């Protein structure tokens, strides 16, 4: 019988790259949970395989609908579940906190409850589950409180947005189901990860999109920005999905939780400078602060200590920051050349 993986949020940046990785590196069947209205831009290269039922299948369900999740889990009985779906934009969570909390906390609970029910109905069914939390759970850590080697798993949570609060709940719900019901659930706190297909609401991606539009003459040569002083440690999304695969396949330990991230740390302003320097128009581009891009509170010291995960799995990031940024910029250049219309966000 074929090994089956279920990916919630397959149409997102991470979910689509995880599907690509699993198709390339395994012989698994890939089942992607998506809503009927989910944009398919990130998976358009997979649609022919979906149509032909060639190892990739879309399952329509919603984290806010318990029965749809139960149906998917009981019908497929996936060996591996990667729970990546979420309301994932911190800025939006300030204006839509209830939706964020409902989708991310209760949605995770609904999914795990569906899995638990399937396991009760069939005692031989024992899936391995990855619940994706976020480094945002650590929030705004004062400089004098940050461990010398970076934020480790034992740092206290101090969430700085409704999104971050929702991911605290996601993290704890995952561990609860592992401890209470013996389910093999592991949670991760992935730090900033990016690359092609990154949503344009995130800082490095909106920078790249604006630069691509400036190069195409669609915008004046001004990049609008928010807080450029936040410190971020970057990983490539393709390294991230490789980490997730290793997480569930290399001696998975029920109830464990890991920080995962890259090695390249800089201020957001340095990221902007790196992207501008990749443009032939670098000498013409100006930078302008946009108050609408500022968060009420910012998690501004996002530097991870990933030694626990590395010691357990041997995973290391391998894609350099410069390649990640170049690939992100080229992704937006290709989209702009494709004649798409974009919001100037």
Image (cartoon, helix red, strand yellow):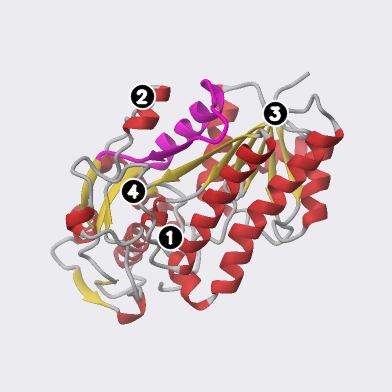
- Can you say which quadrant of the picture contains the C terminus? bottom left
Considering every residue shown, the one lying at the far right of the view is 121
Residue sitting at 76 percent across and 51 percent down? 60
Rendered location of residue 211, percent (x, y):
30, 62
Left or right relative to 183: residue 67 = right
The residue carrying mark 1 is 336
Which residue in the protein does label 2 denote?
Answer: 311
- Dot 3 or dot 4: first in sequence order is 3
- Mark 2 and mark 4 in contact? Answer it, CB < 8 Å: no
**Residue 249 belongs to magenta span:** yes
Q: Which quadrant is home to the N terminus?
A: top right
Rendered location of residue 276, percent (x, y): 21, 58
SS for dot 1: helix
Pointers 3 and 4 in contact (C-beta within 8 Å):
no
Q: Quadrant of residue 312?
A: top left
Q: Residues within 10 Å of mark 2 (few under 14, many from 20)?
A: few
Secondary structure of the residue carrying tag 4 is loop
Nearer the observer: mark 2 or 4; the answer is 4
Residue identifier under label 3:
79
x then y, percent, for residue 227? 26, 69
**Front label number (4 vs 1):** 4
Numbered tag placed on residue 155 in the rendering: 4
Closest to the observer: 148 or 286? 148
Sequence-wise, the earlier of marks 2 and 1 is 2
Measured Cα–Cα span from mark 3 to mark 1: 39 Å
Please identify the residue farthest to the front as the structure is shown.
180
Q: Tag 4: Cα neighbours inside 10 Å, few (<14), some, or many (≥20)?
A: some
Q: Which residues are magenta?
A: 236-263
């Amino acid at each position: 019988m074929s090994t089956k993986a279920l990916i919630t949020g397959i149409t997102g940046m991470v979910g689509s790259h995880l599907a690509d990785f699993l198709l390339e590196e395994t012989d698994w069947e890939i089942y992607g949970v998506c809503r009927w209205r989910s944009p398919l831009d990130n998976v358009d290269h997979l649609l022919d395989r979906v149509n032909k039922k060639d190892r990739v299948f879309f399952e329509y369900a919603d984290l806010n609908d318990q029965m749809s999740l139960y149906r998917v889990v009981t019908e497929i009985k996936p060996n591996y579940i990667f729970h990546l779906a979420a309301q994932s934009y911190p800025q939006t969570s300030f204006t839509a906190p209830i939706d964020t909390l409902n989708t991310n906390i209760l949605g995770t609970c609904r999914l795990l409850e569906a899995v638990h029910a399937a396991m009760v109905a069939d005692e031989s069914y024992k899936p391995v589950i990855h619940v994706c939390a976020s480094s945002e759970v650590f929030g705004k850590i004062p400089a004098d409180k940050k461990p010398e080697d970076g934020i480790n798993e034992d740092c206290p949570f101090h969430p700085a947005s409704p999104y971050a609060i929702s991911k605290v709940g996601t993290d704890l719900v995952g561990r609860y189901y592992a401890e209470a019901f013996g389910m093999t659930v592991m949670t991760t706190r992935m730090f900033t990860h990016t690359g092609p297909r990154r949503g344009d609401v995130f800082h490095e991606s909106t920078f790249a999109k604006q630069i691509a539009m400036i190069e195409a003459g669609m915008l004046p040569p001004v990049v609008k920005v928010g807080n450029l002083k936040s410190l971020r440690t970057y990983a490539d999304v393709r390294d991230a999905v490789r980490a997730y695969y290793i997480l569930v396949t290399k001696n998975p330990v029920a109830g464990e939780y890991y920080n995962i991230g890259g090695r390249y740390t800089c201020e957001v302003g340095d990221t902007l400078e790196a992207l501008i320097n990749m443009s032939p128009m670098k000498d013409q581009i100006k930078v302008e602060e946009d108050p609408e891009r500022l968060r009420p509170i910012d998690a501004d010291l996002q530097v991870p200590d990933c030694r626990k995960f590395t010691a357990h799995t041997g995973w290391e990031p391998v894609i350099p920051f410069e390649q990640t940024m170049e690939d992100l910029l080229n992704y937006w250049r290709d989209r702009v050349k494709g004649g798409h219309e974009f919001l100037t966000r």
